[in-house]
Image: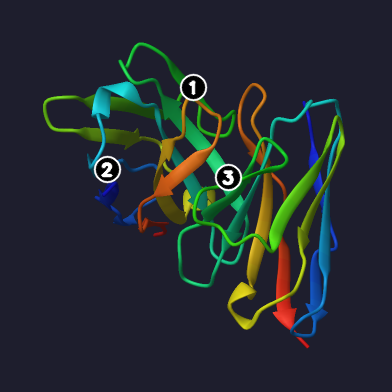
Amino acid sequence: DIQMTQSPSSLSASVGDRVTITCQASQDIRNYLNWYQQKPGKAPKLLIYDASNLETGVPSRFSGSGSGTDFTFTISSLQPEDIATYYCQKHNNLPLFGPGTKVDIK
Amino acid sequence: EVQLLESGGGLVQPGGSLRLSCAASGFTFSSYALSWVRQAPGKGLEWVSAISGNGGSTWYADSVRGRFTISRDSSKNTVYLQMNSLRAEDTAIYYCAKDRNFPNDQFDYWGQGTLVTVSS
């Protein structure tokens, strides 16, 4: 079975900082990788689909890249409203979420 | 506007059963797969089950296969999750989510979730 890992598990950064989260699959998943944002007490929200495509209405400071087994999610300039947990999710065969990365403000 | 409204959660004893419902609106119901995703308290997201737009195909996570059954009623624009033989580890918020284009690709709309607590 494919396993998904994310790093770091949590991070603190200042407003305006560039934030990078990595997601790794244990096998090649091509570009079948999505990113979600979940704020406390809320349902997740799709931000990036198929590794690098920005979902409609999502601010352009969010971006994704990668293919195969290694993927990166970036917030180019962290804003206070970006405080959340971010999950990657593979979607080749059955869906599987990564363990999440909690982002807060330093 | 796409809306997904879950209901049916509550407190149930281990070994018991519960049926969750998800009422959908704002899109052509029979054209899209729908999924259930759960989140145990303080934990991450776990995909549980999915059903195709016409109901002809279903998928389950290993952790629930044989205990949970997903179904849909196009006359009511509602998807269901019948949960039997419930265990403490099934305690979670259960979200209904719409698949973006194809079954199990991306989840572009989510409900607010319904809490299931399995405890004696």
Q: Is residue A52 visible?
A: yes
Quick check: A49 left or right of A78? left
Q: Quadrant of the C terminus of chain A?
A: bottom right
Q: Quadrant of the N terminus of chain A?
A: top right
Place residue B35 in its image quadrant. top left
Q: Position of residue A103 (x, y in %)?
A: 72, 72
Q: Position of residue B60 (x, y in %)?
A: 51, 26
Quick check: B96 left or right of B73? right
Q: Are tags 2 and 1 found on a single chain?
A: yes
Under mark 2, the amino acid is Cys
CA gap between label 2 and label 1 equals 17 Å
| Residue bearing the label numbered 1 | B59
| Residue bearing the label numbered 3 | B46
Q: Is residue B87 visible?
A: no
Q: Residue furthest top?
A: B56
Under mark 3, the amino acid is Glu
Looking at the image, residue A81 lies above or below residue A29: below
* Residue at the image position 72 percent from the left and 75 percent from the top: A78
Q: Which mark is residue B87?
A: none
